[in-house]
């Protein structure tokens, strides 16, 4: 698969971009680069921009692709022979060894266009064990003018042997004012502060939250949890409302809400919560809940999040979560 579409320049990438452009200008371009950091910071866009620049014949002063040469036209059409994009066949599935074996075979050939040969693996943590082992071979004996770009929001899930052979570029959440300035352009009519908060400060997570309607979904869940805590609704009704949504989206809502409850239970005025406008409701939700058990609930959610790609039964998972919440909020503790 090749990467198509124009390269996007995101303002909070400036320092990382300058660093790589400097290495390239000094002929010290690393043969393997790991773009790591939380989701929603545009690491894939950075990889696209980097890939386009590495195959371009007339790179500009800032290190960006010219956008006009034959190579750039091929990149735009998604047909450049030296720019490869390795991803799971479907989102959430694993990257298998065949894809990495093909990479290994291609990487030893000379670049057809005389520039760099670039392989982007995105998301790299989705390589299965044998794929990761096969990649290790290429990392240990790098071919000249071949550059591997690994993109990962969960670099902790990559083997240490792979991480240690890559030049890491770590992306962090930009300062709030920078993120807000960018987001105002993207969502001119939106409640930018709320979208940024629910996106955990990551600008592209905020635009995704906007597109997928996270605020309404989470607020509805917070209301439902409140009614359950006060025993004012039939749990089956709450389960039924939630099963109308994709399981991964329900799990994400639960994860954000419970994360907020854990923080608020510790520090009621905690600043970086996902739902600042719901603080009063969250404070009353968190009241009288055993902190340790609340924290365990958060851990359980993280585990589901990881397992949800393996065909869990959505209704059973949601029933389990609602029951867990009823246990946590049982009058008198247990
Ligand atoms: Zn070009």
Image (cartoon, grey):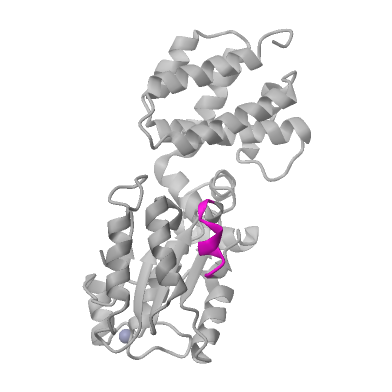
Looking at the image, residue 255 sits to the left or right of residue 56; the answer is right
Residue in the foreground of this view, choosing between 54 and 280:
54
Q: Is residue 215 visible?
A: yes
Residue at 46% from the left image edge and 72% from the top image edge: 140
Looking at the image, residue 310 sits to the left or right of residue 229; the answer is left
Q: Is residue 227 visible?
A: no
Spot occupied by residue 18 in the image (x, y as percentages of width and height): 55, 81
283 within the magenta span:
no
Residue in the foreground of this view, choosing between 277 and 321:
321
164 within the magenta span:
yes
Name the quadrant of the N terminus.
bottom left
**Quarter holding ligand 1:** bottom left
Residue at 27% from the left image edge and 87% from the top image edge: 69
Looking at the image, residue 295 sits to the left or right of residue 111; the answer is right
Q: Quadrant of residue 105?
A: bottom left
Spot occupied by residue 182 in the image (x, y as percentages of width and height): 52, 62
**Above or below, comparing residue 253 to residue 11 in the picture:** above
Q: Quadrant of residue 73?
A: bottom left
Residue in the foreground of this view, choosing between 227 and 319:
319
**Above or below, comparing residue 162 to residue 65 in the picture:** above
Residue in the foreground of this view, choosing between 207 and 36:
36
Spot occupied by residue 145 in the image (x, y as percentages of width and height): 38, 84
Residue at 44% from the left image edge and 17% from the top image edge: 239
Residue at 50% from the left image edge and 79% from the top image edge: 30
Name the quadrant of the C terminus.
top right
**Above or below, comparing residue 256 to residue 59 in the picture:** above
Range of residues picked out in magenta: 157-166
């Amino acid at each position: 698969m090749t990467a198509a579409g124009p390269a996007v320049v995101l303002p909070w990438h400036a320092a990382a971009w300058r660093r790589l452009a400097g290495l390239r200008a000094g002929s010290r371009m690393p043969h393997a680069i790991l773009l790591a950091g939380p989701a929603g910071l545009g690491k894939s866009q950075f990889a696209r921009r980097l890939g386009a620049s590495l195959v371009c014949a007339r790179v500009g002063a800032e290190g960006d692709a010219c956008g006009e040469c034959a190579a750039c036209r091929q990149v735009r059409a998604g047909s450049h022979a030296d720019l490869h994009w390795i991803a799971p066949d479907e989102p959430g599935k694993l990257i298998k060894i065949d894809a990495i074996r093909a990479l290994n075979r291609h990487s030893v050939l000379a670049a057809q266009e005389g520039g760099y040969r670039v392989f982007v693996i995105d998301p790299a943590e989705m390589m299965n064990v044998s794929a990761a082992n096969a990649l290790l071979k290429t990392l240990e004996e790098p071919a000249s003018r071949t550059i591997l770009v690994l993109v990962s929001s969960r670099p902790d899930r990559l083997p240490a042997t792979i991480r240690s052979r890559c030049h890491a570029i770590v992306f962090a959440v930009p300062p709030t004012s920078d993120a807000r300035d960018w987001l105002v352009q993207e969502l001119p009519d939106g409640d930018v502060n709320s979208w940024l908060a629910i996106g955990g400060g990551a600008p592209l997570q905020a635009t995704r939250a906007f597109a997928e309607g996270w605020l309404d979904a989470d607020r509805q869940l917070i209301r439902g949890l409140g009614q359950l805590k006060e025993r004012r609704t039939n749990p089956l009704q709450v389960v039924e409302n939630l099963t109308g949504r994709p399981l991964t989206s329900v799990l994400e809502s639960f994860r954000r809400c419970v994360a907020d409850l854990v923080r608020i239970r510790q520090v009621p005025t905690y600043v970086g919560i996902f739902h600042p406008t719901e603080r009063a409701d969250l404070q009353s939700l968190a009241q009288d809940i055993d902190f340790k058990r609340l924290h365990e609930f958060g851990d359980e959610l993280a585990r589901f999040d990881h397992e949800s790609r393996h065909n869990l039964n959505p209704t059973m998972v949601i029933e389990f979560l609602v029951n867990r919440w009823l246990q946590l909020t049982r009058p008198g503790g247990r």
